[in-house]
Every structure is written in C-alpha cells, then in structure tokens.
Amino acid sequence: MDIAAFNRNAWNLQSMEGCRWSTPFSKDIINRAAKGKWEVILTPNKPVPADWFPSHPDLSGIDLLALACGGGQQVPIFASAGATVTSFDNSDIQLQKDEETCAAHGLSVSTIQGDMIDLSDLDDESFDLVFNPVSNVFSAEILPVWKECHRVLRPGGRLLCGFMNPAFFLFDHYEAEETGEIKVRYPLPYSDLDSLNEEVLSDHLEAQVSLEFSHSLQEQIGGQCDAGFAIHGFYEDSWDDESSILNRWLPIYAATFAVKK
C-alpha cells in the first residue's frame, strides 16, 4: 500500500479533529518569541537546549527547514524569532495551520507538502537548520531521510531530531490499555502492517489511524553518522501515564543534535 498517502489522510483527519500536535499556539506565545522569549520541543516534555540552535533567541539570518512539524506551533515561533522558515509536511491540513497561524501574526512561511524521505523540491545546501520533531515513526524508512537532510543543509548545518525509543514497540499496547498488564508481544523491527494480527490491523486501517514503524538505534543514530553527521548532543524524555502505561518504566523518547561535517 501507499504508506505516505494513507498516513497523509490519517493525519489530515487527526488534525481536523484536533489534538495536542495540531492545535496552533496562542497569540501570546508567538508574540513572546519576537521578544526573544521562546522554547520549543522535539519530544513531548523537555525543551530543546538553547545552545542546540545556531543562534538563540534571535534567529535572524537563519534558513530553517521545519520537517514534519506542521500544525501552527513551532513554525510560527521560529518565524516570529526571525528565521526564514520552510515548512515541509505530509499533511495538507497541518501545513494549512502553519500558513493560517503565520498569516494571522503577519509572518511569512513557505510550505511544501510531501514525503520526508524525498526532499527533491529543495535545493542542495539551502538551509542552516533542520528541525524534525518525532515523526519518522510514521515512515517505513528513515535512512533516506538522513541523506536528504544532509544534502539540503549547508556545511556546518544542524539537524535537530526527536524519535521514539524502539523498545516501545516490543509491547502490546492494546492489551495494556484494557488490562493494565505490560506484555512483550512483538519482535523488532516493528511494523503495524507486518506485526498486528489480521483482525486488529483491519480495525486499525478502517479507523484510519496512522501507521507506525519502529527504527533501531543503529538506524536513528548510526544512520545520521553514516549520512555524514556528527552527533553533538543527546537526551531522553518521558511521555505521560495517560498516553502510555510504559511511561512509568522507561524513557519513551529521545532527541539528537547533529552537525553536517
């Protein structure tokens, strides 16, 4: 099946219904960014360290690619802080929210709809920073993502990325929600398409829930290194108990700061 097309539709529906990641930030938050008072997240809770940015709080002169983080949140903050921002996302509705939120605050943004493994619409060495919150979980492949990020960044450019701990996908989350019991169910690498039984997968597809895929740490971190990046920073993050019972037992998310060599 066309995974990118399915997930585009799923995220369009989710964005229209509204969730934490598709609710545009308030006027106050965006206006404060223009005054140098802002922070953003790559993962659910921890703010990205200020020194991960090439300049903070003033991003004037920075060409920034917001990769798969539409929804009227980080993009208007970066634009308000002075960056020239291109928002690239698989979801039309998420991009529309970036456009509408920026327009409402007199900010400019360029938007491109597409699959993150193919950034061919973007020129070589055209960005200083790629900001990529947790999203590669929705892509069956991630090694092409790192290669494309490396291509579009200038020498010394920065890639800030959030991703899920692959251990999250070992467990049966449907059963955990129903019984409160955590059971190892799936071998890694995990794929909704290959790992779920036929009945559960059928329900999943009918409900148009976005498809997810685990990626090993070798692919997440080693893949960036193999693409030509040097890792300069790393942290782990939690979620919340309501979203996953596993939150009590392990850090579910991580983030990397990489520099193009």
Image: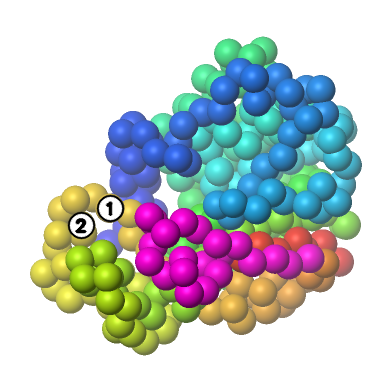
Q: Secondary structure at mark 2?
A: helix
In this view of the protein, can residue 175 be seen by the observer? yes
Looking at the rendered structure, the number of numbered marks drawn on it comes to 2
Inspect the magenta stretch and tell me whether residue 240 lies in it: yes
Dividing the picture into quadrants, the one containing residue 1 is bottom left
Which residue is drawn at the image coordinates 19% and 51% (left, top)? 207
**Dot 2 amino acid type:** Leu
**Front-most of 63 and 202?**
202
* Percent coordinates x, y for residue 11 in the rendering: 37, 44
Q: Are marks 2 and 1 in contact (CB under 8 Å)?
A: yes
Q: Residues within 10 Å of mark 1 (few under 14, many from 20)?
A: some
Left or right of 209? Residue 20 is right
* Percent coordinates x, y for residue 158 in the rendering: 79, 55
Q: Which residue is mark 2?
A: 205
Which residue is drawn at the image coordinates 82% and 29% (left, top)? 36
Quadrant location of the C terminus? bottom right
Q: Which residues are magenta?
A: 233-253
**Dot 1 amino acid type:** Val
Left or right of 3? Residue 222 is right
Q: Secondary structure at mark 1?
A: loop
* Percent coordinates x, y for residue 130 in the rendering: 71, 49
Q: Which residue is mark 1?
A: 209
Which residue is drawn at the image coordinates 33% and 54% (left, top)? 210
